[in-house]
Image: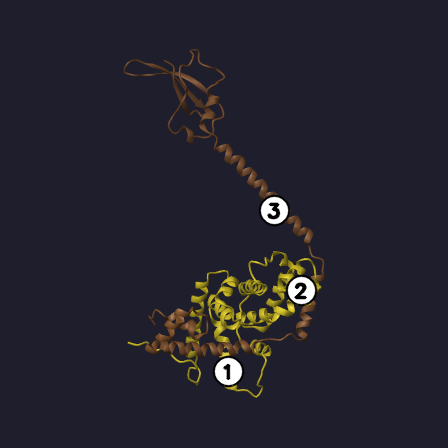
Chain colours: A yellow, B brown
């Protein structure tokens, strides 16, 4: 690895040919993206760490399969992570953000304002739980488009589906999120305005 | 919510790129439709909350991550069964090639034209005593029968109003008639 700032494609080609430094660099660059995706998808920091580990193990073994022109490294990694999330979901029950898992998940967060607004944190926790409770297809769209800030085209590439499908899943997922947040049995009123229909 | 612009309103509110025409249409529509205005407001609030969630869950590489990387690098350095994987790949390729070759062979064998079958039948081991005067005519449905391997020619008389007519009937190994030719 002579280039001080090699592209992701060069790194993955290096991994395929056995360059361990290339792998370390790719890991440092993309670990946080993959980890955030896994945390939001499975709702468990512990499980997310396992998924990240498995995903990067898969990178070691299947770097030769990467086709630079067809996708980007980030989308490729998210696709691998997505497969591992689905596999984990199939092999064991996905944990919800309760008890220890909830605490572990909050350990991942960076508290910019430690004195912070507790109410705001409660809203965020409610939102996090609502995202995890979404059906997988809608959760994937919300996590990729809203939390990972991917475009519809990139999300469609990661999910291997049409752009229109991503868009409709995202809209449906957001509607479900809004409904769940407003239906929660909290003393506080719904933080989101309720949609009214004109007669 | 039956407004035809609903989907565009959601994209507009969440800041997704819309083409200029649609963006202008939504901007002009919102002040006139209370339902869409409320939806846009709700989507903006939701987007802001999701952005906060995304920001707060952002992680930075830490010492723990380096330890995890160390574990992955240990796996990276470990000898991997590349040869075995290559051998499996070669084996699968060979098996696939054999299957394709077998498929082509048997497929072509079944597709032989019926004419070839009757070329064999036209030279029977025990030809009839009288010389044939015409070519064999394939009986209807004979081509759908099992492949013709061997058979015999049986001479028989077929009754006609003008009198009996002699014909050779080619019968296959299964006893089913395949073709006929009239002798007289």
User: Is residue B147 placed above or below A99 in the rendered structure?
Assistant: above
The chain letter under disc 3 is B
- Assess disc 3: are there few (<14), some (14-19) or many (≥20) residues with their C-alpha within 10 Å of its C-alpha: few
| Residue A27 appearing in the image | yes
| Residue A47 appearing in the image | no
| Circle nearer the viewer, 3 or 2 | 2
Left or right: where does residue B172 sit relative to residue B99? left
The CA span between labels 3 and 1 is 55 Å
Residue closer to the observer: B46 or B129: B46
Q: Residue at x 68, y 64 (%)?
A: A22
- Assess disc 1: are there few (<14), some (14-19) or many (≥20) residues with their C-alpha within 10 Å of its C-alpha: few
Asked which secondary structure carries label 2, the reply is helix
The chain letter under disc 2 is A
Q: Position of residue A115 (x, y in %)?
A: 57, 88
Left or right: where does residue B60 sit relative to residue B131? right
Q: Identify the disc placed on residue A122.
A: 1
Residue closer to the observer: B78 or B62: B62
Residue receiving disc 3: B92
Q: Identify the disc placed on residue A23.
A: 2
Quarter that holds the N terminus of chain A: bottom right
């Amino acid at each position: 690895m002579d280039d001080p700032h090699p592209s992701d494609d060069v790194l993955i080609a290096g991994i395929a040919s056995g360059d361990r430094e290339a792998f370390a660099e790719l890991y440092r660059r993309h670990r946080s993206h993959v980890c955030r995706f896994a945390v939001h998808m499975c709702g468990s920091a512990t499980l997310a760490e396992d998924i990240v580990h498995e995903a990067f193990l898969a990178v070691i073994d299947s770097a030769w399969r990467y086709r630079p022109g067809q996708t980007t490294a980030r989308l490729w990694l998210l696709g691998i992570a997505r497969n591992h999330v689905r596999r984990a979901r199939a092999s064991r029950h996905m944990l919800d953000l309760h008890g220890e898992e909830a605490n572990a998940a909050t350990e991942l967060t960076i508290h910019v304002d430690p004195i912070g607004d507790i109410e705001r944190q409660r809203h965020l926790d409610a939102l996090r739980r609502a995202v995890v409770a979404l059906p997988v297809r809608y959760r994937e769209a919300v996590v990729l488009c809203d939390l990972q800030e991917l475009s519809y085209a990139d999300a469609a590439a990661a999910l291997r589906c049409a752009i229109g499908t991503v868009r409709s899943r995202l809209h449906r997922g957001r509607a479900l999120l809004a409904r769940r947040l407003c239906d929660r049995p909290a003393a506080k009123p719904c933080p989101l305005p309720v949609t009214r229909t004109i007669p | 919510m039956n407004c035809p612009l609903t989907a565009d309103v959601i994209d507009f509110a969440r800041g997704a790129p819309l083409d200029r025409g649609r963006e202008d249409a939504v901007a002009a529509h919102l002040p006139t439709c209370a339902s869409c205005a409320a939806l846009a407001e709700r989507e903006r609030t939701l987007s802001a909350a999701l952005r906060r969630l995304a920001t707060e869950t952002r992680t930075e590489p830490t010492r723990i991550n380096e330890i995890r990387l160390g574990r992955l690098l240990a796996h990276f350095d470990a000898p991997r069964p590349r040869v075995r994987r290559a051998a499996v790949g070669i084996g699968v390729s060979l098996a696939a090639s054999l299957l394709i070759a077998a498929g082509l062979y048997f497929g072509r064998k079944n597709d032989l034209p019926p004419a070839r079958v009757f070329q064999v039948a036209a030279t029977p081991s025990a030809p009839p005593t009288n010389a044939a005067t015409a070519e064999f005519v394939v009986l209807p449905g004979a081509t759908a029968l099992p492949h013709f391997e061997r058979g015999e020619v049986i001479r028989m008389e077929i009754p006609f109003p003008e009198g009996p007519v002699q014909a050779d009937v080619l019968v296959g190994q299964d006893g089913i008639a395949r073709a006929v030719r009239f002798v007289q």
